[in-house]
Amino acid sequence: MVAVPARVPEDAVAGLRTLSGRSSTSEQAADALRRHITEGLLRPGAQLREEAVAAALGISRNTVREAFRALSREGLVEHTLHRGVFVRRISAADVVDIYRTRRLLEPLGLRAVADRPRAVAALTQTVTAAETAARAGDWAAVGTADIVFHRTLVDACGSDRLGRLFDQLFAELRLAFAVIDEPRALHEPYVGRNGRIVRFVAAGRAEDACAELDAYLRDAEAQILAALDD
Amino acid sequence: MVAVPARVPEDAVAGLRTLSGRSSTSEQAADALRRHITEGLLRPGAQLREEAVAAALGISRNTVREAFRALSREGLVEHTLHRGVFVRRISAADVVDIYRTRRLLEPLGLRAVADRPRAVAALTQTVTAAETAARAGDWAAVGTADIVFHRTLVDACGSDRLGRLFDQLFAELRLAFAVIDEPRALHEPYVGRNGRIVRFVAAGRAEDACAELDAYLRDAEAQILAALDD
DNA sequence: GCATATTTGTCCGTATGTATA
DNA sequence: CTATACATACGGACAAATATG
């Protein structure tokens, strides 16, 4: 048989789940690849070879290529002509822009939350979940709770399009997280800070909450940028 | 030969320009379709039949399908399983959400502009261009100048991702504009209002500028919603 | 730098299923 | 209900670009 060329391991794509459902095959393929990427099973920079993906999913190359086009528009993969498709590598400039965007938008959500007791309750709940997960040492769950916290903030703006922008933005951030091997150092500090934010809001001190949020975002940005240098 | 079925006229796609360049064929096809849609040559609701598009562009159906997947992610077309691809129809709910988003984000840009004389100059220039076009009766150019004005606002935020969100959002708005047959009634009122906004900013009255911007956005939303009811 | 192998890009033909007149 | 047009999906083919030894 053929010697495995393996610039990238042949089984990088082996665990893709079997497809089933009533959406189109290419959409199911895109879903499977999306899950694999966001769960960190496919690392940034890894190449997705058409034939390997097609074989792993039991579908044709043409259908795989359709899935690639969709994922490319989502920013999860990069397409280079005649070279192929690779899991997106997030640059330092991307991180800077992502956090600039967050610092602009999340305060809008925070001020919207201030008027809504139910939103404050939802935020409190995610902080509690994060604290529980942190005590259990489940840093992946802590990271998820952090994302839910900030997504809840944005949701309070009431704009679907802003919500979708943030989903995409968080998907990119996950790609940056994937490069960091220390989930604890990454997520632990922010459990307490989210708690402070929500307590400020609950106390009606919206400006203090915004200041804390801004500090949180600046520190998180600096931490990821530092981790990206290696 | 085959009788033309023509739920949609066969030549709806006939004017697609010939492809050429150094990007992939499917990307060039997507570009050509994107231009046709944003320029209003392909109306919302029109079906893009694979074979017709492939024939018009002189490419294969597989390649057309790849282009469709990309355009679908951009929100320019809608994909319905086993029915095909249609130019996106913007709903009233979409319009409401789009303007909600604009009312959240554009004030951020307006406050950022206030500190930058060069940005104020750029805004002034687009207003002048709009006034010139209005005197000439070129309402398409007036519409373009309006878009440039508000895009300049958002640009002042300094976030690429916000800029891209707005590009997409304006692309959707163009789909809504395509349903309106009176370009003059649509664009004329806003030439003067953009002028007021920029004069407030130049005078250091940022809050007055924001109030005028908010009123502008509410009126524009109401006008489009009214036109959409028919 | 060159020859070769691999992979992508693109096309075609075709079979099957689905929605609509 | 049937017929038809169309989308879905596959597999094979070949050229062109890229990677490899």
Image (tube, coloured by chain):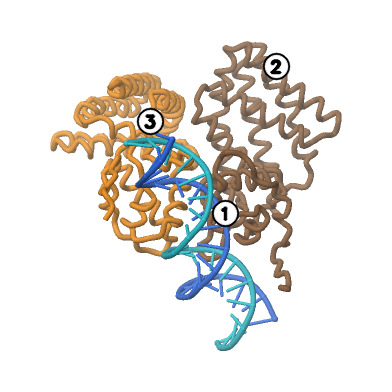
Chain colours: A brown, B orange, C cyan, D blue
Q: Residue at x 17, y 34 (%)?
A: B134
- Numbered disc 3: what chain? B
Q: Which residue is mark 3?
A: B90
Disc 3 or disc 2, which is closer to the eye?
A: 3
Q: Secondary structure at mark 1?
A: helix
Q: Residue at x 60, y 60 (%)?
A: A50
- Numbered disc 2: what chain? A
Q: In front: B180, or A220?
A: B180
The three-letter code of the residue at mark 3 reads Ile
Q: Which residue is mark 2?
A: A199
Q: Residue at x 40, y 51 (%)?
A: B30
Disc 2 or disc 1, which is closer to the eye?
A: 1
Q: In this orientation, does residue A227 appear?
A: no
Which mark is on residue A64? Answer: 1
Disc 1 with disc 3 on a shared chain = no
Whether residue B217 is situated above or below residue A101 in the rendered picture = above
Along the horizontal axis of the image, is A196 left or right of B108? Answer: right
The three-letter code of the residue at mark 2 reads Arg
Q: Residue at x 43, y 40 (%)?
A: B83
State yes or no: discs 3 and 2 in contact (Cβ < 8 Å).
Answer: no
Local packing at callout 2 (Cα closer than 10 Å; few below 14, some 14-19, many 20+) is some
